[in-house]
Amino acid sequence: MPILTPKDVAYFEGLTGRYARGAKPMALNFPAARDRKCHKNTDAFFRCHPDHPAVRGWLVAELGNAPGYFCLVAHSANRAPDGTLIDVTPLSDTDRKAYRFVEHDGSDERFNELKPHLPSCIFRS
């Protein structure tokens, strides 16, 4: 796993600082969606529904027994024309309740640089 730079740490501190404003995307059954393939799923959904662009971001959950510590996972959702976030990737009800979706703040290139740091990790705010 790549080493986090001070710029990366600042990004993730900002991300966890926005946790409280994170969204709970609406789950939508998309037959072509596959487990753990959220980026491909959202891109495929966008090809079928060009008015629902992909939105890159992170599933963030604060650990209940360790306030200020967060689990972060790179994730993608789609945005409906009315602004609603839609998640077409299959997730358990437990995961949907635990996580909030916090949108990536930056370019797709920056998101792709950051993804390898956090396939799933704990970060202290």
Image (cartoon, rainbow, N blue to C red):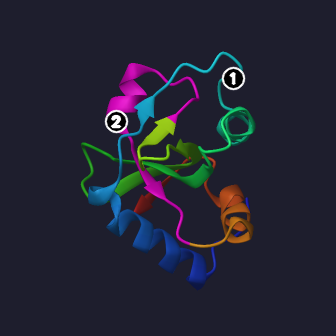
Q: Between residue 70 and residue 106, name the one nearer to us.
A: 106
Q: Which residue is mark 1?
A: 34
Q: Which residue is mark 2?
A: 98
Q: CA distance from mark 1 to mark 2?
A: 20 Å
Q: Between residue 7 and residue 121, name the one nearer to us.
A: 7
Give the amino acid at mark 2: Ala
**SS of the residue at dot 1?**
loop
At a point 42% along the width and 72% down the height, the residue shown is: 13
Inspect the magenta stretch and tell me whether residue 92 lies in it: yes
| Residue 125 visible in the current orientation | no
Q: Which residues are magenta?
A: 87-105
- Mark 2, other Cα within 10 Å: few <14 / some 14–19 / many ≥20: some
Inspect the magenta stretch and tell me whether residue 96 lies in it: yes
Q: Provide residue 1's location: percent of width, then percent of height.
A: 73, 58
In the shown orientation, is residue 51 left or right of residue 2? left
Give the amino acid at mark 1: Arg
At a point 25% along the width and 42% down the height, the residue shown is: 64
**SS of the residue at dot 2?**
helix
Give the number of the mark in front: 1 or 2. 1
Residue 44: quarter of image: top right
At a point 71% along the width and 20% down the height, the residue shown is: 32
Q: Provide residue 65's location: percent of width, then percent of height.
A: 24, 44
Q: Between residue 109 and residue 46, name the one nearer to us.
A: 46
Give the vertical position of 4 relative to 39 (above or below): below
In the shown orientation, is residue 64 left or right of residue 53? left
Q: Quadrant of the C terminus?
A: bottom left
